[in-house]
Image (cartoon, helix red, strand yellow):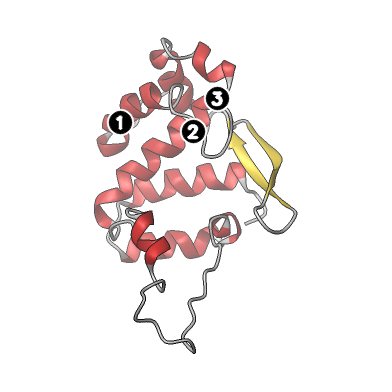
């Protein structure tokens, strides 16, 4: 197995250390993740085998209750797949626009000003899971337009394709 180079490699060990101890958003801590807290080298090695395509990632789709409307399926990745994904996205971070998810207080306060007119409205749309439905070829094109490295884009698209083959 050939170790990847560049920004992916430098992000990989940090991701492998962070993933087992970082919680999954809106899910309780998983004991299997905590058991891997001291196994970051093994998680990194397994993540490399996922990133280079020699091994498929493990993922489960679980129903997650939505606040006001039933449930939606969420994909929960194994720690090694999360590390591969995290390192893959970190390798692309510098060419992407900054995240719009930095200040939720500002988001929640938007439109609640006492100066707001009664006929003004704010529409809040949940697009959290939309990335699962974006065509991978469209994503790859956009990443390349933004100036991303072709090898990093290919690695991410291969990983996404193995998790979400329908796109």
Task: Place residue 11 in its image quadrant.
Answer: top left
Name the secondary structure under disc 3: loop
Pinpoint residue 115: horizontal percent, then vertical percent. Answer: 34, 81
Classify residue 6 by image quadrant. Answer: top left
Residue pointed to by mark 1: 9
Q: Residue at x 34, y 61 (%)?
A: 106
C-alpha distance separating marks 1 and 3 = 27 Å
What secondary structure is marked by label 1?
A: helix
Instruction: Give the image location of residue 107, x and y in percent.
Output: 39, 62
Instruction: Please tell me which residue lies in front, 34 or 87.
Output: 34
| Crowd rating for badge 2 (residues with CA inside 10 Å; few <14, some 14–19, many 20+) | many
Q: Earlier in the sequence, mark 3 or mark 2?
A: 3
Secondary structure at numbered mark 2: helix
For label 2, the residue is 82
Q: Position of residue 163 (x, y in %)?
A: 60, 42
Q: Tell me how far mark 1 sits from mark 2, CA to CA.
A: 15 Å
Residue 29, disc: 3
């Amino acid at each position: 197995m050939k170790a990847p180079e560049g920004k992916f490699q430098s992000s990989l060990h940090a991701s492998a250390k962070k993933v087992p101890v970082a919680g999954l958003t809106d899910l309780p801590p998983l004991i299997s993740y905590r058991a891997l807290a001291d196994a970051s080298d093994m998680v990194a090695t397994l993540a490399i085998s996922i990133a280079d395509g020699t091994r498929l990632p493990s993922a489960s789709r679980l129903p997650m209750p939505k606040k006001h409307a039933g449930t939606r399926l969420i994909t929960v990745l194994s720690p090694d797949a999360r590390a591969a994904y995290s390192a893959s996205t970190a390798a692309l971070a510098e060419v992407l626009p900054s995240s719009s998810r930095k200040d939720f207080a500002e988001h929640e306060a938007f439109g609640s000003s006492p100066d707001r007119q009664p006929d003004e409205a704010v529409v809040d749309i949940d697009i959290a899971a939309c990335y699962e439905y974006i065509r991978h070829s469209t994503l790859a094109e956009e990443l390349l337009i933004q100036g991303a490295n072709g090898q990093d884009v290919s690695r991410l698209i291969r990983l996404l394709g193995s998790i979400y083959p329908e796109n």
